[in-house]
Image (spheres, rainbow, N blue to C red):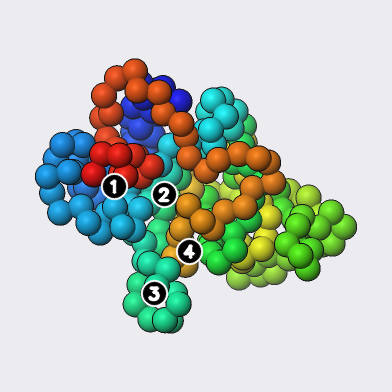
């Protein structure tokens, strides 16, 4: 993605988030220089901040996602079973913009439609060896009740509704009837190592630097901080 496009998506996404009364933390608005000059150790270590991805495919409007990680623990916390064991994200799935089929090895997550259009989630169970199971039903908790779908079934969440996805549940999602503001509450989030995609794609965007960044992405931290 061109940096100019990323800057534009950031501005549009921030306005969309604010339209629902959700305000991001102050560090979201630090310039790259200000962030570098501040105590950014925890922000970098825990992968907090902006994340705009086209999964390295160069077609963000069709295949992409807007994310901001608000808080996050560490894998070490999970291993010792104490400390900050949770994470929170706010995301935007544009209408008909696919977040492609994937699963997590460790992360359990609640996906919440916070407002906008409908959030459509395609679901599959895993085989005993971890691949997509094309034959078995998949059961997921939806706001306190267990919902069972056929393999590849579509779960539609309206604003206020949510689903719990446990490790190994394959899922893809997109907005329908408008862009969707999505909340994610989960166990510790590790976007570098805890995603397996059905397609041969990357997790982060490849950035073409045609202008200076307004704000750094999580994937920029190693280069800039």
Q: CA distance from mark 1 to mark 2?
A: 9 Å
| Number of residues whose C-alpha sits closer than 10 Å to that of mark 1, classed few (under 14), some (14–19) or many (20 or more) | some
Residues tagged 3 and 2 counted as in contact (Cβ below 8 A) = no
Can residue 127 be seen from the camera position used here?
Answer: yes
Disc on the earlier residue, 3 or 2: 3
Q: CA distance from mark 4 to mark 3?
A: 14 Å
Disc on the earlier residue, 3 or 1: 1
List the residue tagged with mark 1.
24
Label 4: element kind:
strand
Label 2: element kind:
strand
Report the quarter where the N terminus lies: top left
| Number of residues whose C-alpha sits closer than 10 Å to that of mark 4, classed few (under 14), some (14–19) or many (20 or more) | many
- Is residue 101 depicted above or below 95 in this figure? below
Q: CA distance from mark 2 to mark 4?
A: 12 Å
- Residue 211: image quadrant is top left
Disc on the earlier residue, 1 or 4: 1
Disc on the earlier residue, 2 or 4: 2
Q: Which mark is residue 90?
A: 2
Q: Residue at x 30, y 39 (%)?
A: 223
- Residue 59: image quadrant is top right
List the residue tagged with mark 3.
77
Q: Nearer the viewer, mark 3 or mark 2?
A: 3
List the residue tagged with mark 4.
186
Going by the image, does 190 lie left or right of 108?
left
Q: Nearer the viewer, mark 3 or mark 1?
A: 3
Please name whichever residue, 208 or 188, is drawn nearer the observer in this view of the structure.
208
Expressed as whole percent of the image width and height from the top left, the position of residue 164 reads: 59, 64
Q: CA distance from mark 3 to mark 2?
A: 22 Å
Residues tagged 1 and 2 counted as in contact (Cβ below 8 A) = yes
């Amino acid at each position: 993605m061109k940096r100019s496009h990323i800057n534009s998506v950031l501005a549009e996404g921030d306005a969309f988030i604010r339209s629902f009364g959700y305000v991001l933390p102050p560090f979201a608005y630090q310039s790259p220089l200000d962030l570098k000059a501040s105590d950014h150790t925890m922000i970098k270590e825990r992968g907090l901040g902006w994340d705009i991805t086209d999964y390295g495919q160069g077609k963000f409007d069709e295949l992409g996602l807007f994310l901001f990680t608000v808080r996050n623990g560490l894998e070490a916390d999970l291993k010792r079973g104490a400390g900050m064991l949770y994470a929170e994200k706010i995301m935007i799935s544009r209408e008909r913009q696919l977040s492609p089929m994937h699963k997590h090895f460790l992360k359990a997550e609640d996906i919440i439609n916070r407002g906008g259009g409908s959030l459509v989630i395609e679901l599959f169970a895993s085989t005993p060896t971890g691949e997509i199971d094309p034959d078995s039903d998949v059961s997921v908790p939806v706001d306190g009740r267990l919902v069972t779908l056929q393999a590849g079934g579509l779960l539609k969440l309206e604003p206020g509704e949510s689903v719990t996805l446990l490790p190994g549940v394959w899922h893809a999602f997109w907005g329908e009837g408008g862009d969707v503001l999505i909340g994610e509450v989960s166990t510790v989030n590790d976007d570098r190592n805890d995603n397996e995609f059905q397609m041969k794609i990357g997790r982060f965007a490849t950035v073409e630097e045609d202008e200076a960044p307004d704000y750094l992405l999580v994937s920029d931290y190693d280069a800039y901080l």
